[in-house]
Image (cartoon, rainbow, N blue to C red):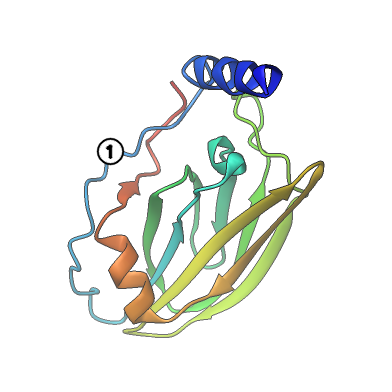
Amino acid sequence: MKKLLGIVIISLLLSGCLPKVTPTGGSFSGLNIEPDKSRIIILRKGGSLISMDTPAVNISGTTSSSYYLPSKAFIQEDIIAGKYNIIIKKPEGTGLVWRMDPFSLEVEAKKNETLYLELKATSIGVLHSSKLEVIDGVYALKNLEIFQRVLRTDRVK
């Protein structure tokens, strides 16, 4: 028991020293989408031992953008309607940790609509997995109230 307690305390101390991304975009305001545009919102709840991990999220299609997505944060990207490929991968050259294999999801953004996605990551021992799935707008909006928005300009500190 003492050994486990020691590991937990050391982990907590080290977590303060790890590089991290602090969202600076503020809370969700629910602004309307510009006419003839679409919106993609990707949220990440976290809440497990893997929550300190921070992936790079690339959204590419008609336009392209790149973010880092820590736990309890969200990305809001207003885009031109069309097909987009969302890639979740380990950040390069940042010191950030992401233990999952890279993967991607192709989505179709429709004009004047918001597409809500959630990044879920789990870890059981040495087995880690992550997935990006489409979620219900009511569920997303409930969670967005307590999260902070990540901007493209938010970098590792």
Figure check: 146 above or below 8 = below
Q: Is residue 78 visible?
A: yes
Residue 37, picture quadrant: bottom left
Quarter occupied by the C terminus: top left
Foreground of the two, 148 or 152: 148
Q: Residue at x 37, y 37 (%)?
A: 153
Q: Which residue is mark 1?
A: 24
Circle 1: is it few (<14), some (14-19), or many (20+) Cα within 10 Å?
A: some
Q: Amino acid at mark 1?
A: Thr
User: Left of 25 or right of it: where is 116?
Assistant: right
Residue 52 occupies quadrant: top right
Residue 150 horizontal/vertical position (percent): 36, 45
71 over 6 or under it: above or below: below
Q: Is residue 10 left or right of residue 138?
A: right
SS type, badge 1: loop
Question: Which corner quadrant holds the N terminus?
Answer: top right
The answer to whether residue 38 of the structure is visible from this angle is: no
Which x, y percent locates residue 68?
50, 42
